[in-house]
Image (cartoon, rainbow, N blue to C red):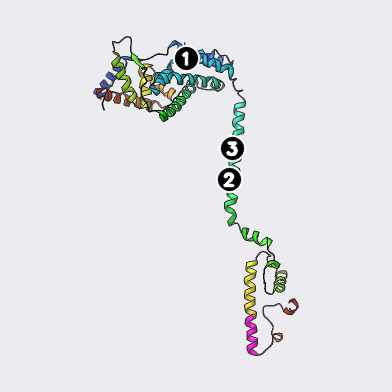
């Protein structure tokens, strides 16, 4: 479905106060938000939990969402805020570490071994969060720099430079994992 | 530069050999169930109340800030206001309260005739001290000259004024 048409449907459902808007929101934003949260939190389990929190917050603020000028920006802002809060709470308890459940798995088309995907996941985890999010959204969700800039509320040049620095650092990490 | 770009392309190709783990179906059911449940339990806030509430909060905050600023401003400036603490202290003090005021009837006469401000007690005291010294000096001169007080006219007292009538 066209992005604009999907947004119109969502707005209409929100203004009618129709719970069917929840499924429309999931179809439009669910996969992207999960990808972003996996990149931000480096944990599939935590990403799923935070995704639920994000949806509950969207439901509570549905009137604000219906009146928001840019639906995408509003929803992604909620996700960023929830991820930041979660990270702050989690850092108090334990440092950032990979989950037992991998959030990066071998692609179907490629004959990638599980060890290879685990190595990629470990290298991505060691990237700074601001670079990792952009690399994951660009590589695995095929987002353009412009779309990523809108999602993360950054300038186009910032997104492009962080993507480049992220790839350079990944190259160094994959070449020498001990560094 | 080309070499760097080629290396970065290789990294991208390497990354594409993996994919993100997609959301399981049960996750969708779990999240949508919780969302619909919350939707039914929590009614949406009426839109016009939101800006009204914001306006009320802003107004309350503004009143609080201005009140605090006024209070601390007055408190800070007060000690430098002319005669504030001295005047406040002097308000309750009358000349009758001052112990051992020399020539108190004479002082009252001075205030009445000269229009000296009732609160300017310290300046008045200084003036009285100077008058007293002058009078003492005049008395000593008289004693040295042999002339009595009755024959001497003080230059400081108004003409025709007899100090004895005020004792």
Q: Is residue A4 visible?
A: no
User: Which of A125 and A46 lies nearest the eye of the viewer?
Assistant: A46
Q: Which residue is mark 3?
A: B61
| Residue A67, quarter of the rendered image | top right
Q: Is residue B7 visible?
A: yes
Q: Residues within 10 Å of mark 1 (few under 14, many from 20)?
A: some
Q: Give the extent of the magenta segment.
A: B136-145
Q: Position of residue B75 (x, y in %)?
A: 59, 51
Find out whether the residues at labels 1 and 2 contact each other: C-beta distance under 8 Å: no
Q: Which residue is mark 1?
A: A28
Residue A49 is left or right of residue A125, and the answer is right
Q: Main secondary structure of the magenta part?
A: helix
| Residue A104, quarter of the rendered image | top left
Q: Examine the rendered structure and indicate whether residue B145 appears above or below residue B89.
A: below
User: Which of A105 and A19 lies nearest the eye of the viewer?
Assistant: A105
Chain of the residue under label 3: B
């Amino acid at each position: 479905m066209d992005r604009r048409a999907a947004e119109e449907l969502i707005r209409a459902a929100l203004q009618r106060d129709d719970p069917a808007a929840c499924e429309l929101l999931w179809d439009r934003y669910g996969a992207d938000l999960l990808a972003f949260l996996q990149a931000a939190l480096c944990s599939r389990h935590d990403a799923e939990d935070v995704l639920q929190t994000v949806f509950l917050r969207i439901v509570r603020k549905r009137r604000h969402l219906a009146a928001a000028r840019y639906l995408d920006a509003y929803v992604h802002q909620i996700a960023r805020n929830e991820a930041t809060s979660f990270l702050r709470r989690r850092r108090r308890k334990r440092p950032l570490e990979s989950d037992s459940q991998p959030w990066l798995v071998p692609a179907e088309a490629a004959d990638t071994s599980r060890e290879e995907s685990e190595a990629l996941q470990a290298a991505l985890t060691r990237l700074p969060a601001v670079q990792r999010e952009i690399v994951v959204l660009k590589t695995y969700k095929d987002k353009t720099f412009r779309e990523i800039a809108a999602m993360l509320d950054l300038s186009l040049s910032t997104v492009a430079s962080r993507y480049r620095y992220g790839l350079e650092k990944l190259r160094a990490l994959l070449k020498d994992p001990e560094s | 530069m080309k070499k760097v770009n080629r290396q970065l392309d290789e990294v991208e190709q390497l990354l594409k050999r993996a994919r993100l783990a997609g959301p399981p179906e049960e996750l969708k059911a779990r999240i949508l169930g919780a969302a619909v449940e919350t939707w039914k339990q929590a009614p949406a806030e009426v839109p016009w109340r939101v800006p009204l509430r914001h306006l009320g909060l802003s107004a309350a905050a503004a009143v609080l800030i201005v009140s605090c600023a006024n209070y601390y401003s007055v408190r800070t400036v007060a000690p430098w206001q002319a005669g504030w603490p001295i005047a406040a202290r002097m308000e309750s003090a009358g000349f009758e309260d001052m112990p051992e005021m020399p020539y108190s009837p004479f002082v009252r006469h001075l205030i009445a005739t000269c229009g000296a401000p009732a609160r300017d007690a310290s300046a008045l005291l200084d003036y009285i001290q100077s008058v007293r010294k002058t009078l003492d000096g005049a008395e000593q001169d008289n004693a040295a000259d042999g002339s009595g007080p009755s024959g001497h006219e003080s230059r400081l007292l108004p003409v025709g004024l007899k100090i004895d009538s005020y004792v």
